[in-house]
Image (tube, rainbow, N blue to C red):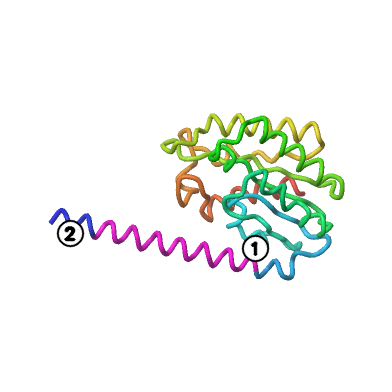
Amino acid sequence: MCLIIAAAAFSGCARKHVRDINKLERTVEAIRKNNRNACTPGCIAFDGDSNMEIINFQEYLTEPACNYALRGSTTEEVLKRKEMLHSLNPDAIIVLVGGNDIIKGTTPGDISRNYLMLIRYYRTFCKKVYFISNLPVDPNIYIKNSDMMRLNERLRQICKNLGATYVNVYPHLLKDGGLNPDYAIDPVHLNKAGQNVLVDILKKYLQ
């Protein structure tokens, strides 16, 4: 009986996981479809990692929202595709990246250097540059929120020195020392409620 119950529970979790994955894939496909029309001069351009990739910013904005973010992206990988944003001549650039650098063991010095290079490059053609703070994560996984906080402090200082805007969403998504489970689909990614919080904060800066 215990095995049957366990199997049923596991099956239910597996089905939910598959539904979540399918929903995310549909969201990403909708974003890519929107990009065909939204990636035009004067748009608001987004880049970064998976937490940016899965947000359909066009649902929140009246301006064209072009989203080039890709799951797994590091600061170095965003650097490699920086010319894509240049070709758009966007009205504003918004980036969230850095957590994957910690996962891959990139040194703090290298992450800071990449942030510097990104902001300096973006500001050669766009004066409205925003970097969103890296998000808290579930405290039970191997990535430490103390590392995220140190990374965010470095990013905040770099933004201040180079004239970019630092958008601090970290404390608004934090609960009991980690990512608020009400805002999460897993230990590191936001659900729709979490995305609403992030975008609401971002829009205050954009205004």
Indicate which disc, 2 or 1, sits on the residue closer to the N terminus: 2
- Where residue 134 appears, as percent x and y from the top left, is 61, 40
- Where residue 3 appears, as percent x and y from the top left, is 17, 55
Query: Toward the viewer: 5 or 110?
Result: 110
Give the dominant element type of the magenta stretch: helix, strand or loop: helix
Instruction: Examine the structure image and report whether residue 108 is included in the region drawn in magenta.
Output: no
The amino acid marked with disc number 1 is Glu
Specify the quadrant of the image occupied by residue 155: top right
Q: Which residues are magenta?
A: 8-32
Residue at disc 1, secondary structure: helix
| Mark number, residue 59 | 1
Q: In the figure, is residue 169 to the left or right of 165?
A: left
The amino acid marked with disc number 2 is Ile
- Where residue 97 appears, as percent x and y from the top left, is 64, 44
| Mark number, residue 4 | 2
- Where residue 45 appears, as percent x and y from the top left, is 74, 56
